[in-house]
Image (cartoon, rainbow, N blue to C red):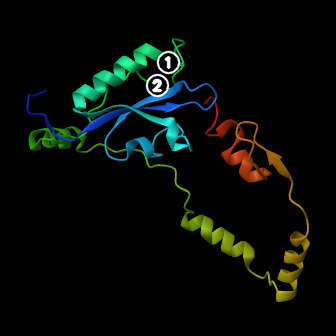
Amino acid sequence: MSSNQYIYSNQCFYVYAYIRKSDNTPYYIGKGSGNRAYSKNHNISVPKDKSKILFLETNLTDIGSLAIKRRMIRWYGRKDIGTGILHNKSDGGDGCSGAIRSDEFKENLRKINKGKIYPKRKSSKLTDQHKENISKSMIGIIRTSEHNQKLADSKRNKPRPKIICPHCNKIGASGLMQRWHFSNCRFIQQ
């Protein structure tokens, strides 16, 4: 690593905590700038009650905020390794927010990755063969407006079963609730 690998921007950072409703203890310690504390772009659920977001320190440098985050995580401990109450997955102090990569660094990265073939990600798009098969299977099927009306009427007045999520007490249709709640509920262990 060369000393000019990256240059830090002079952004102001802060350290924040998400607070539990039940006992007012923190369940996550984070570091950010701008709107990061309110952003849902991380694996921890953001409290709906904005008063449960506590800013511990503000107007910090990147390095200062990383140090404070690391100290707070060490103080409260992590649940995943059995040392405390936080849902953080690392000891903090990692990452390089606001880093602006040098041209030399970018060129080295290009050289390293040149010619590499990455496996294609699984896509939800249908292949041409699959589309053709679906098309062939639908040939000859005629759905009249009367047929469509009968289908709609058969579904219209039938109650859909409702279930309750044990974590957030939300009530909803079983398919959606099983997808977004129960073991996937964002209120688990807060």
Name which residue type carries label 2.
Lys
Instruction: Say if 188 sits above or below 137 in the image.
Output: above
Q: Which mark is residue 78?
A: 1
Query: In the drawing, does residue 10 fall left or right of residue 30?
Result: left
Q: Position of residue 97 (x, y in %)?
A: 27, 37
Instruction: Please rate how many residues cluster around mark 1, counting C-alpha atoms within 10 Å: few if below 14, some from 14 to 19, many from 20.
Output: many
Instruction: Say if 125 sits above or below 163 in the image.
Output: below
Instruction: Please rate how many residues cluster around mark 2, counting C-alpha atoms within 10 Å: few if below 14, some from 14 to 19, many from 20.
Output: few
* Quadrant placement of the N terminus: top left
Name which residue type carries label 1.
Arg
Q: Position of residue 187 (x, y in %)?
A: 63, 37
Q: Is label 1 in a helix, a strand or a loop?
A: loop
Quarter location, residue 13: top left
Residue drawn 44% across the image and 45% down it: 38
Q: Is label 2 in a helix, a strand or a loop?
A: loop
Q: Position of residue 88 (x, y in %)?
A: 47, 26
Distance between mark 1 and mark 2 Cα atoms: 7 Å
The residue pinned by badge 2 equals 89
Residue drawn 69% across the image and 47% down it: 179
Mark 1–mark 2 contact, CB under 8 Å?
yes
Lower sequence index among marks 1 and 2: 1
Residue drawn 91% across the image and 70% down it: 157
User: Which of the two residues, 36 or 110, is positioned nearer the viewer here?
Assistant: 36
Quarter location, residue 116: top left
Residue drawn 29% across the image and 26% down it: 66
Q: Which mark is residue 107?
A: none
